[in-house]
Amino acid sequence: MRLKNKVAIITGSASGFGKGIAKKFADEGANLIMVDQNSKLLKKVSKNLFQDYFVADVSKASNFKSLFNYVYKKYNKIDIIVNNAGVTHKPKFMETVTEKEFDKVFNVNAKSVYYCGKFFVPKMKKLKKGVILNVASTAGLSPRPKLNWYNASKGWMITATKAMAIELAPYKVRVNAIAPVAGITPLLKSFMGGDTPKKKQAFLSTIPIGRFSTPQDMGNAACFLCSDEASMITGTVLEVDGGRCI
């Protein structure tokens, strides 16, 4: 029960890594506000975990502001925010990625973290407590060909994590990131450019430990970094990647 009575927001928590993090946090005693724009799936998953939910598109300021108002009206505090929501474009040469695709990647992967800072950080600073966890990617540390602007968005998130951490440390607010390798999530097919045994094997060959990451792997890492056990850790990017970045 490392997160007992902690109030935690997890974006993109209806599936994939976000769902795995939500399950682990629930098992560890947290009170969750699960956030996703897929209302049907979100309601189903949150019901199974006996947790609260809020339907939102975190790339939009109005949605993030509504989330803030909802949380403080109902819980009057927030202890943990996990910025997990993320999208990618299909593998292609950088000059062929459309402006619409580029904007979507950065609005979801980067702007949502900006909105987290804009709406939630002032209250955390005032109360001098809180933890923010950004879900980055090994793509931001060791970019893969043809995932150019997705790579860049995760590199941005890693730098943003460190920038937030150093600025918020005097206020006792910790900010860290986890960097998963490709995992068993709905995005895997997009990363690989299709779902075939050959493509899977090619991806797996880049992971020394020999398997994809799982939502459970992310949940375990996220739980530690968001718990009081990690009270001396801020500004770090924990690679949960089976050796991919070695």
Image: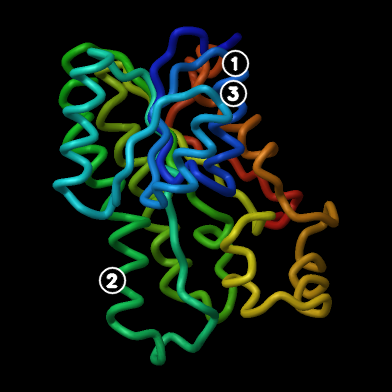
The amino acid at mark 3 is Phe
Cα separation between marks 1 and 2: 36 Å
Q: Residue at x 39, y 24 (%)?
A: 80
The picture places residue 129, in percent across and down from the top left corner, at 31, 14
Q: Residue at x 44, y 28 (%)?
A: 234
Cα separation between marks 1 and 3: 10 Å
Return the mark for residue 224: 3
**Is 64 placed left or right of 13 in the picture?**
left
Cα separation between marks 3 and 2: 33 Å
Disc 1 versus disc 2: nearer the observer: 1
Q: Residue at x 39, y 62 (%)?
A: 153
Q: What residue is pinned by disc 2?
A: 103
Mark 3 or 2, nearer chain start? 2
Q: What residue is pinned by disc 1?
A: 28
Q: Residue at x 51, y 75 (%)?
A: 147
Disc 3 versus disc 2: nearer the observer: 2
Q: Is residue 91 above or below residue 154?
A: below
Mark 1 or 2, nearer chain start? 1
The amino acid at mark 2 is Asp
